[in-house]
Image (spheres, helix red, strand yellow):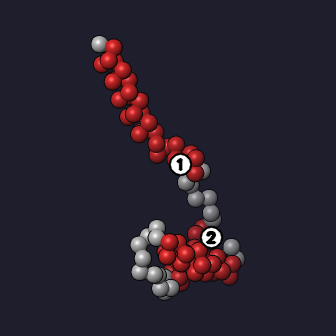
Amino acid sequence: MKRNINILLIGIFCIGLSGCYEFVVRFWNGPGWDFSSKAEKKAKEECFEELESIKEPKAYIGSKEMQDWLNNVYIPARNECLKRKGF
């Protein structure tokens, strides 16, 4: 009987942890709400449309090649575009 109770408690604990995992991750990473203004959102959308013409490497997302391309090409271009638009 004691063994059944322990198994039940462990099961409840595991289900509770898996259910709260997303909440904990969001809390740890900060709020997911976007507090930017409408003008900033519009500028980001315009920059996204401008930067769609930049060719991506034919690597899978998460690869070192893709991360290098993001860090060396895309993000600086996006930041420069946002600066031109006043953000």
Task: Give the residue drawn at x 38%, y 27%.
Answer: 10
Q: Secondary structure at mark 2?
A: helix
Q: Residues within 10 Å of mark 2 (few under 14, many from 20)?
A: some
- Dividing the picture into quadrants, the one containing residue 4 is top left
**In the image, residue 21 above or below residue 39:** above
Distance of label 1 from label 2 (alpha carbons): 23 Å
Q: Of residues 7 and 84, which is closer to you in this image? A: 7
Q: Which residue is mark 1?
A: 26
Task: Give the residue drawn at x 53%, y 78%.
Answer: 69
The quarter of the picture where the C terminus appears is bottom right
Task: Give the residue drawn at x 46%, y 42%.
Answer: 21
- Dividing the picture into quadrants, the one containing residue 15 is top left
Task: Give the residue drawn at x 49%, y 43%.
Answer: 23
**For marks 1 and 2 on the same chain, the one whose residue lies earlier in the sequence:** 1
From the viewer's perspective, tell me whether residue 71 is left or right of residue 49: right
Q: Of residues 36 and 1, which is closer to you in this image? A: 1
Q: Which residue is mark 2?
A: 40
Contact between labelled residues 2 and 1, with CB atoms less than 8 Å apart: no
> Callout 1, which amino acid?
Arg
